[in-house]
Amino acid sequence: MHIGEIRAETTKITLFDFDKDRFQEKQIKSVREALPFRDEPSVTWINIDGLHEVEILKDLGDCFGLHPLVMEDILNTENRPKAEDYGNYVFLIANELHYDEKSHEIEKEQISIVFGRNFVLSFQEKEGDVFDPIRDRIRSNKGRVRKMGADYLAYVLLDSIVDNYFVILESLGENIEDLEGTLVSDPSRQSADILHRLKREMISLRRSIWPLREVISGLQRSESPLIQKETGLYLRDVYDHTIQVIDTLESFRDMLSGMLDIYLTSVSNRMNQVMKVLTVIATIFMPLTFIAGVYGMNFKNMPELDWRWSYPLVWLAMLSIAGWMLYSFKKNNWL
Amino acid sequence: MHIGEIRAETTKITLFDFDKDRFQEKQIKSVREALPFRDEPSVTWINIDGLHEVEILKDLGDCFGLHPLVMEDILNTENRPKAEDYGNYVFLIANELHYDEKSHEIEKEQISIVFGRNFVLSFQEKEGDVFDPIRDRIRSNKGRVRKMGADYLAYVLLDSIVDNYFVILESLGENIEDLEGTLVSDPSRQSADILHRLKREMISLRRSIWPLREVISGLQRSESPLIQKETGLYLRDVYDHTIQVIDTLESFRDMLSGMLDIYLTSVSNRMNQVMKVLTVIATIFMPLTFIAGVYGMNFKNMPELDWRWSYPLVWLAMLSIAGWMLYSFKKNNWL
Amino acid sequence: MHIGEIRAETTKITLFDFDKDRFQEKQIKSVREALPFRDEPSVTWINIDGLHEVEILKDLGDCFGLHPLVMEDILNTENRPKAEDYGNYVFLIANELHYDEKSHEIEKEQISIVFGRNFVLSFQEKEGDVFDPIRDRIRSNKGRVRKMGADYLAYVLLDSIVDNYFVILESLGENIEDLEGTLVSDPSRQSADILHRLKREMISLRRSIWPLREVISGLQRSESPLIQKETGLYLRDVYDHTIQVIDTLESFRDMLSGMLDIYLTSVSNRMNQVMKVLTVIATIFMPLTFIAGVYGMNFKNMPELDWRWSYPLVWLAMLSIAGWMLYSFKKNNWL
Amino acid sequence: MHIGEIRAETTKITLFDFDKDRFQEKQIKSVREALPFRDEPSVTWINIDGLHEVEILKDLGDCFGLHPLVMEDILNTENRPKAEDYGNYVFLIANELHYDEKSHEIEKEQISIVFGRNFVLSFQEKEGDVFDPIRDRIRSNKGRVRKMGADYLAYVLLDSIVDNYFVILESLGENIEDLEGTLVSDPSRQSADILHRLKREMISLRRSIWPLREVISGLQRSESPLIQKETGLYLRDVYDHTIQVIDTLESFRDMLSGMLDIYLTSVSNRMNQVMKVLTVIATIFMPLTFIAGVYGMNFKNMPELDWRWSYPLVWLAMLSIAGWMLYSFKKNNWL
Amino acid sequence: MHIGEIRAETTKITLFDFDKDRFQEKQIKSVREALPFRDEPSVTWINIDGLHEVEILKDLGDCFGLHPLVMEDILNTENRPKAEDYGNYVFLIANELHYDEKSHEIEKEQISIVFGRNFVLSFQEKEGDVFDPIRDRIRSNKGRVRKMGADYLAYVLLDSIVDNYFVILESLGENIEDLEGTLVSDPSRQSADILHRLKREMISLRRSIWPLREVISGLQRSESPLIQKETGLYLRDVYDHTIQVIDTLESFRDMLSGMLDIYLTSVSNRMNQVMKVLTVIATIFMPLTFIAGVYGMNFKNMPELDWRWSYPLVWLAMLSIAGWMLYSFKKNNWL
C-alpha cells in the first residue's frame, strides 16, 4: 500500500546499464525488460519516478529479492532517513528538499536507494532533476562514475542530494540576513511572523537532515562487502558535507533565536517610547490645566482676578512651568 | 497486590493456540484450562484483560514460572516501559495510549508482555481493541504471524502499540496546527490555555514513549536465544518507528515553544496597540482642554475675551493642533 | 570528627542476627557485645542511630576493618550518594528524605550502609522509621529476607529508602496540581512564591536522587563477589524505581516551568486588562471634558451660548460620542 | 618567559625532605642546595612561591629533567587545570581560589604540581597558606603523610586545594541565601546587580573547577607506576569531593536562575501595581471632572443652575459615582 | 574549480628546504622547480598564497600525489576544520581568523595543510603574517623546528593559528567588558545592538573553532606513522590550548546572555520609572483639577462662593492634598 501524497501521474522507469567501455539508456515499461540486465556484471541503474502503481514496484522488488519491509518503507513516503544492510543489498532512505521561494515553504520528497553488487535502484515520488547531472556524466563518461561500481553510483546519488541542501541553505541564509536587516530598521508584526515561519522551517529541515548524519556514518562504519574501500573515502567526504549542513542549520537556529531577542527588545523599546510621549504630554499639560482651572473658579473673593497684570503673569507662569519641564525631560534624555 | 485504578470489571482470559496449519481460540476461566497448551510446541498466546483478580494472575505466573518481581511489575500499573531478560522468558512493559478528542486528554494504559519459546502472555488493564487486527490475522492466517514463533507474535503486539501512537500523534498534530492558526488570527486567553495543556500532554507522552526506545534497542542487542535472527529485522523496523514517533514529538515540542513565543509577542503587540490609543487620545485632548481652560478663567483683564473673532479663532487653533498631531501620529505609523 | 547537625541525643545501636531458622534482636551499648556475632556465618545487621559519639563508631569501624576514609564519610553527613567497593565490604551512601507538609520543606538525612559477606552496618543521623517494616519482616520471617544473605538485606534497606521517595513525590505531585489549579483561577503573588519554592525543592531533590542512579547501576555492574547473581535481579528492580523517580522529578520540573509561563502570561494579560480599562475611561471622558471646557470659556461673542436648545444639544452630542466609543470598544473586544 | 601578573616580590623556595623516621626543613636560595636530596630515597618536597625569577625555575626544571612544555605551562599562569603523565613524573595544574568577602570577587591562582618517584615540586604565584596544615602534619608526623610516598603527598596538596573550594562555596551559599531573602522582601535594582555579579562569578568558578574533574579521574585511571594502588583510593575520595563541589555549583546556578525569575516577576508585579493606582485615580476623577465641567458651561438656558438643591445633588451624584467605583475596584481586588 | 572569494591577486609560492645543518629559501613560479626537493630527505615546506590559479595547484597536487578530493577541499574555501589521514600524507583544514577592530567583524580564512614524511604544503587564500615568526625561526635555527621532522613543522603551523585565536579572544573580551560597563551605566539601544552583534560573532567563531578540537584530538589518537611520538606531546599542548579557547568562548557566551538579561531588566526598570512619573503627576493633579472644576460651576446656589475665606481655604486644601500624596509616594519609595 502506498502511504503519502500521489505526486506523479504515471510511473516512469528509466534504466541505465554501463561499464567502463559502453553504456545503454532505456525507458522501460515493465520489470521484464530489466531482467536481462540484472545478471550481467555491468552496473544497472533503475530509477523509478512515481510510487502509486504498487504492482510494478512489487514486481521489481521480487525481481531483485527485496525484503517486504524494504518495499513497505519505499511505499510509505514519510520515513525518516536511514540505512539498512540486508546482506545482498543496502537500503537507504534520504529526503530531497525543494524550497519554494514564493511561499517560503520547504517541500520534502522521499528518495529510496537500494544498491547491490551490480545494481542500483532509486525511487522518487515524482520526476525531479537532481539526478540529471549524473545522467549526463554517465552518458559522456565524465568523472569516475563509469569506471567504478554500484556503491560509487549510490554515493553519487546521495552526494547530489546533499549538494542540493547547500542550495536551499543559501536561499534560507539570504532570507535570514534580509530579515535581520528589516528587524533592526523596522520591527513590524510582519517581520515577527516571517521569523516564526523560518523557525518552523528550521524544525522541519532538522528532522530531515539530522538523521542523515547517522545514516552516512553508519554506511562508513559498515563492514558490508558491497562497499569498497575506495568508496569509503568518498563517503567520508559526503559525511563532512552533511556535518557542514547541520552546522549551518544550527547557526541559523541560533541566529533566529538572537533575532527573536532583537525583536522583543525592540518591541519593549517602542513601548517605552510610547509611554514616554504620554508621560511628557501629561506631565506638561496637567499642571497647566490645573492652573487654568483655579482661575476659572467663581469665588467672589479672588483678588488676583482683578489685578491688571495677573492674566499675562499667569501665562508667564504657565510657560515657565512648561519650559522647565521640557528642559528637565531633555536632561533625562526623554526627548 | 494490584496498584493502580481498577478499569475492568471481570478478568477476561483469551487463549490462542496456533501453528502453521491450525489454530484454536478459547475463552478460559482458570489457568488449569491453559496448562495442556503450555507444553505443546505450538505457539500459545494468552491475553488477560483486567488485573484486579490477583489470584488468577498469581496462578498464571506460577504456571509459567514467572519471577515474583515480574508479577509485581505486572500488577503495579504505573511502571515505566522496560524490557528484561529472565533467561526462560523475556518481560516487556509498554504503554498503550488513548487520546480523548473531547477533553483533550491522553490516557495511559500499561500493557505487559511476557514471551518464552512457545508462549506469549499479554496483560492489559481493560479490554482494548489494538490487538483485534492481530487476532484477525491469526484467524485468517494472513501475513506471517502463524508461520513464525512466539518472538514474532510479541513483535506484532509491540508494533500494533507503536502504530497506535501514530494515530494519536496525527490527532495532536491537527490540534497543534488548528491552534497555530487561531493564535495568529486571535491570540486570546483560551488559546494560551490550550497551548499550556498541549505542552503538559507532551510531557506525559514523552515519559511514556521515550523509554520505549531503549526497550526496543535493548531487545535488538540482546543475545537471548528466544529472539530469532529474522525477528531482529522486524525489531529494527519497530525501532525506526519509535524513533520517528519521538522525532515527531520533539518537533511538536519545538513548535509549541515557538507558538508560546508567538503568543507572548502578540500579547506585547496588543499592549503596545492599547497604549498607542491611550497616548493618541491624551496627546490630542490634553492641549485642547488646556486651551479651553485658559479662556474659562475669570480674570477681569483678558482682552481676547472681548474680541469679535477670538472664539472662532480659538476653534481654528484647536482644530489645527489636533490636525497637526493626527498628521504626525500618521507619519510615525501610530495610527 | 562528626561534620553536620547533631540530630539524635544518644547513640542507639540495634543488633539483629539471623539465618533461615532463627533470629536474635538485641539493643547493645558497646561494640564488644557485637564481636561474637561477627565471625559467625549468620547475617548480622547492626543499625546505629545518632552519629556524634565518635568513639563508639570508631571502635565499630576498627572491629569490622573499615578504611579511615569510610569512617570519615560516615561521620561527615553531607556526602553525595555513592557506592564504593573495598574488597571485603561494599560501602554505600544514600539520602533519606522527609517532607514537611506544613513548611513545604524537604529535609535530608544521610544513611550509610556497609555490607560484607555476613554483616550489614547501617548508620542514620537520627532514629527513623523507614527500616521498621524490614525489622518486622525479619522477626516474622516474612518474605525472602531471612533466607538470603547480607547483600539482599542491603538491597532491602536501599529499596525501602527509594520506596519512601515515591511517597514524597506523591505529596509534591499533589501540591503541584493544587497550585496549577490556583494559578489558572487566581494568579496571585502568593502562588508565584509557592511556585518558586517548589522549584527550589526540585533542585535539592535532584541533587539527592540523581547520583543514586549511578550508585545502583555501579553496584549492578560491579563484579564484587559479595553481590550474588540473584541479588543482581533485585538491584535491577530498584534501579528501575530510581529511574522512575528521576523521570517523575523531571516531569515535575517541566510542569513547574510550564506553570511559570502560565503565571507570566496571566500577569501580562491582567496588565493588558488594566491598561484597557484606563484607556476606555480616558478615551470616553477626555473628549467630553474638552467639550464641556469649550462651553465654559468666557468669550463675549459665543452665539451658541444664547441659543435655546444648545444645552440639550450638547448633552446629546456628548452622549452620542460616548455611545459611539463604547460601541467601537465593544466591536474591538475591549470590553 | 613568565606570562601573568607578578604577585610575589621574591621567589621563596622551601624544601622538605622526610621519611618515616626523620624530616628536614630548609629555606634554600638556589637549586644547587636541592641537588643532594634529589637522589636520596626519602621524599623531597620543594615548594616555590613566586614565578617571575625565570632563571631559578629553569635551573630547577633542568635539575629534575622537566620537559620544556612543562616549564612553559608552569610559567604561563593562565592555564586550565590538567594532568599529564610524562613517564618519569606526573604534571598537574590546579587553581587555588580566594574569595574576597568585601568586593565579592573571586581571585584565581595557578598551582602547578610535579611529582616523581621520590620528589614533589609545587609552584605558586604567591605565598599562600593552604599548604600550611600539611607542613604541620609533616613536622609533627601526624596522619599518614610521612609514612607514604610522593604520590600521597601530591594527593594531599590537591586535597587541600579542593577542601578550600568548600570554604568558598559556603561563603557564596550564604551570600545567595541573603540575596534571596532581600529579593523577596525588596526587589530593588541593587539586588539585581548583585544577582548578575554572582552569576558571573559562577561562570568563572565553573571554568576553574569543571576541568579538575577530568584531571582527577584521569589520574585515577592512569596506569602510571608512580601512583600506588593505595593512593588510588584517596584519589577516589578527592574525586568525590570535586563532584560534590560541581554539584553544589550547579545548584547555585539553578538557584540564581530561579532568583532572576523571582526578580522579573516582582518587577512585573510592581508595574501592575503602579498601573492600577493610575487607573483607579483616573477612573474616579475623570467622570467627576467631566460633571464639574458640564456645570461650568456658560449656556444661558441651563435650568439646573437655578434650582435650589442642584449643587448639593451634584455633590451627592459625584460622591455616589466615586463610591460605586471604589466598591467595584475593591470587588475586583484592585485595591 | 575554486569556490570562494578571490583574495590574492597572484599566486605566490614560497619554498623552504631545511635540515639540522642547512636551509634554503626560494620564491618559485612553477612546480617543476619544487620537484628536486621532493625526493630529498630534508624537510621541504611549500607555502602557497592565493588559490585561484587552479592549474598551478593541480600540478602541485599531482606532483605530491594528492587525492582529487583533497584538491577539491583545498580549492573550496568554505570547509569545516577537519583532519584526514590518506596513508602517505595527512590533510588538515583550519581557519585563520582576523578581527577587524573597527567594524567589529571577524573574517575567516581557510588554511589547508598537507604533510607527509618529508614535506609540508600549506595553502592560504591570501598572503598573511601568522607564519612569519616560523620563517624567522627556520632562518635563524631558533627553537626545535630545524631539528625535527615535517610533522613537527605542521604542528608549529597549527600552533601559530591557535595562538592567534588568543589574540582575537583578548580583543573580544575587552569589547565585552567595555560593553558590560556601558550597559550598567547607560542601557541604550546602541548597546543592545552591539550586544546582538557580539552574540552573532560568537556563533560564527564557535563554528570555526569547535571542530578544531576533534581535529587535533583525532591527530593525537591517529596511529599514522607520519606522526612521531615526540610530536604527540606537542599536539597535546595545542589541544589544551584549543580547549582553553573553547572554554573562553563558552564563558563569553554565558556572559553575553547574562548581559542581555541585564539589558532587559534595565529596560523594564526604566519603563517602571516612566510609569511612576506619569502616575505621580496624574495622582496629584487630577484631584486638584477636579476641585478647581467644582468651584468653576455656575450654580446659583453655591454658598461657599460667597464666603470670605473660601478661596484661600481651597488653596490650603489643595496644597494639603498634594503634600499628603507626595508624602505617601515618598513613603512607598516612588520618588
Image: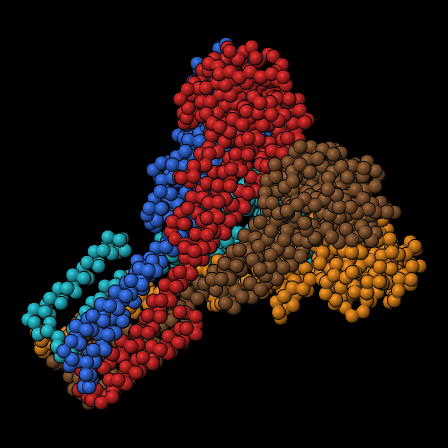
Chain colours: A orange, B brown, C red, D blue, E cyan
Q: Is residue C281 visible?
A: yes
Quarter of the image for residue A333 reads bottom left
Residue at point 39%, 61% (across, down): C271
Left or right: residue A246 compared with residue E325 = right
> Which one is nearer the viewer's eye here, A34 or B99?
B99
Residue at point 51%, 15% (across, down): C26
Left or right: residue C296 compared with residue A130 = left
> What is the count of numbered marks?
0
In the rendered view of the protein, which quadrant contains the C terminus of chain B? Answer: bottom left
Q: Residue furthest left?
A: E308
Q: Please provide percent x and percent y for residue C214.
A: 59, 34
Residue at point 40%, 69% (across, down): C335
Residue at point 39%, 64% (across, down): C273
In the rendered view of the protein, which quadrant contains the N terminus of chain B? Answer: top right
Q: Please provide percent x and percent y for residue E34.
A: 73, 48
Quarter of the image for residue D136 reads top left
Query: In the displayed structure, would residue D187 be above or below residue A278?
Result: above
> Which one is nearer the viewer's eye here, C177 or E296?
C177
Q: Is residue A67 visible?
A: no
Query: In the displayed structure, would residue B19 be above or below residue A200?
Result: above
Left or right: residue D248 compared with residue E219 = left
Query: In the displayed structure, would residue A140 be above or below residue E202?
Result: below
Q: Please provide percent x and percent y for residue C173.
A: 50, 44
Q: Please provide percent x and percent y for residue E194.
A: 46, 57
> Which one is nearer the viewer's eye here, B289 or B2?
B2
Quarter of the image for residue D270 reads bottom left
Left or right: residue C287 compared with residue A155 = left
